[in-house]
Amino acid sequence: MMKTIIVFLTIIVGLVVSQSSSSASGSGSVVEFTSDLSISSEWDHYWERCVGSGHAWLGTRRDWQDALKIAHDKLGFERVRFHGIFDNDMNVYQQGANGEAIYSWYNVDVVYDYLVSIGMSPFVELSFMPNDMASGDETIFHYMGNITPPKNFTTWNNLVVAFLEHVIDRYGITEVSKWHFEIWNEPNCGFLYVPGYANQTTEVLQTAYFEILNETFSAVKSVNADLSVGGPATCQSQWIPETLQYCKDNGIELDFVSTHEYPTDIVPLQRNIMYQVLSKSREIVGDDMQLFYSEYNDGLFNRHDTTYASAFAIFNIIDVYGLSDIFSWWTFSDVFEEQGQQSVPFNEGFGLQTIYNIAKPSFKAFELLHETGNLRYNTTGSHPTAGILVTNSWNKNEVLVLVYNHNIPDAPMDTETLAITLENIPSDVKKATIRRIDEDNCNPIALWTEMGSPSYPSTSEIEQLLKSTEFNEVSIPITKLDKHTIQVQLDIPPQGVAAIKLHF
Ligand SMILES: *[C@@H]1O[C@H](CO)[C@@H](O)[C@H](O)[C@H]1NC(C)=O
Ligand SMILES: *[C@@H]1O[C@H](CO)[C@@H](O)[C@H](O)[C@H]1NC(C)=O
Ligand SMILES: *[C@@H]1O[C@H](CO)[C@@H](O)[C@H](O)[C@H]1NC(C)=O
Ligand SMILES: *[C@@H]1O[C@H](CO)[C@@H](O)[C@H](O)[C@H]1NC(C)=O
């Protein structure tokens, strides 16, 4: 108990110090940004269209459902994408004694009913193979999704058609028209295995995948030509030109091209690697095709629980704006079991929330992004690591200034002092506040570490951890430069994020 109190005091002191320090700057000079509130353009919340999760069966669990509702309510996510709607654990298909198909949709309904009940839709990944129609035994992950093609495409196509007819019957075509149907997952990165080939070469995998793509595309369109279908759902932004060529040669008009990118797959890592990769993909698909990044994250290394992920998210979501129609963070929760469900709360899982729904710094970053409105104000100024985004807010008469300081690991960065000038303000500022995400704010892993990194935190420890994720909103001084111009100054530490809210 004593230890707990000391820890708590330390955190409070840490907050006060970080909020009030406005002197020490690494470079010594002030970084200037200017925003003109009379010039605005659209600010589309493209990152909210979808978020990732593990596999379909998790959707039958209450902890998963609770975590999803929190992510939907606080972060605004509209759809959720996960693997394995046809996996054996979902029990959608069995072959009867006379070879007939026996379908069972109850488990699917449990998951989709819940999504629809909270105002979300599935981003349907048509995967993997029910054992009774699989051409081989190879599986992936702890949950053993079968990754082989069907032994008979008629059986597979019939399953896809029966599945679609069932969901249209249950949820209505208006609802199902909002969904997207993505064919398989990462056929180029271990999620497809073609029996009979000792060497699973790109050629073997592409031939098999394109047959799945062609058959599944036709099956979906045979049910309703307006349903949105796409692929190739590859890892590392690969196979995009090959997929477009195959579709052109075979008269397939995809509704979207989808792929994935984890920035650490590219060596050496660069700060704007997501921008470079997404720009190239956009150039390949052209402006008339929807491009979905149906998975991404701050990387495949272990920084997901830290402020690195929050600064990464803010910087990149601003940086790649306009390149991708869907940008789906993998994942919303550490209720996840690709390598088996982890029971330590901070296990560097992909989730925005830990088990017990403790908001990681990345979750808090998405919370701030969700608060941004639909207009972005013209901003000038640049810096190698620090940047800003100025938007309106859903609350009338408010302007939100998001500030970040981000670089890749082990690259140089300092605490920076920013002077942000806002021109053409509508009226005098009535109130100005700041909230922060950094080492000392909204950083529950720090408190958990001070607690001795308990594998199974007690109820009271969990309560303290949850409390440490709340924003500490304090006022910030504003300097009036003239009748229409104000300035605000702040320090922003490495991998720090801040949100300044101005009420006019
Ligand atoms: C494939 O499945 C269909 C439908 O179940 C069946 O009519 C057909 O005979 C099967 N083809 C082969 C080669 O087994
Ligand atoms: C598999 O095929 C690739 C590309 O064709 C080749 O480079 C590689 O050496 C092959 N591996 C084996 C084990 O045969
Ligand atoms: C594509 O699928 C259609 C419908 O099943 C089939 O008729 C056609 O032969 C397939 N084409 C290729 C190249 O596999
Ligand atoms: C911001 O305004 C400047 C000057 O008017 C202009 O050159 C620039 O293109 C604008 N930027 C945006 C993003 O609108």
Image (spheres, helix red, strand yellow):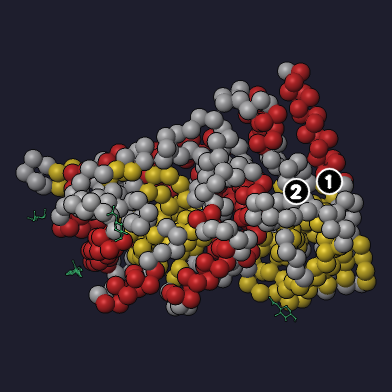
Specify the quadrant of the image occupied by residue 421: bottom right
In percent of width and height, residue 428 lies at 88, 65
Where 491 sits versus 289, above or below? Answer: above
In percent of width and height, residue 380 lies at 76, 73
Residue 472 seen in the current view: yes
Where 339 sits versus 24, above or below? Answer: above
The amino acid type, in three-letter code, at marker 1 is Gln
Q: Earlier in the sequence, mark 2 or mark 1?
A: 1
Q: Residue at x 88, y 58 (%)?
A: 28
Residue 163 seen in the current view: no
In percent of width and height, residue 286 lies at 45, 77
In the image, 350 versus 178, the foreground residue is: 350
For numbered disc 2, what is the local secondary structure?
A: strand
Structural crowding at the residue carrying mark 1, measured as other residues with C-alpha within 10 Å and reported as few (<14), some (14–19) or many (≥20): many
Q: Residue at x 33, y 43 (%)?
A: 140
In percent of width and height, residue 362 lies at 62, 48
- Residue under label 2: 436
Q: Mark 2–mark 1 contact, CB under 8 Å?
A: yes
For numbered disc 1, what is the local secondary structure?
A: helix
**Label 2 to label 1, Cα distance in Å?**
8 Å
In the image, 33 versus 325, the foreground residue is: 33
Ligand 1 is found in which quarter of the picture? bottom left
Q: Is residue 342 left or right of residue 322?
A: left
Q: Quadrant of the N terminus?
A: top right
Q: Is residue 405 left or right of residue 321?
A: right
The amino acid type, in three-letter code, at marker 2 is Arg
Q: Residue at x 93, y 69 (%)?
A: 481
Q: Residue furthest left?
A: 98
Q: Quadrant of the C terminus?
A: bottom right
Q: Residue at x 65, y 36 (%)?
A: 445
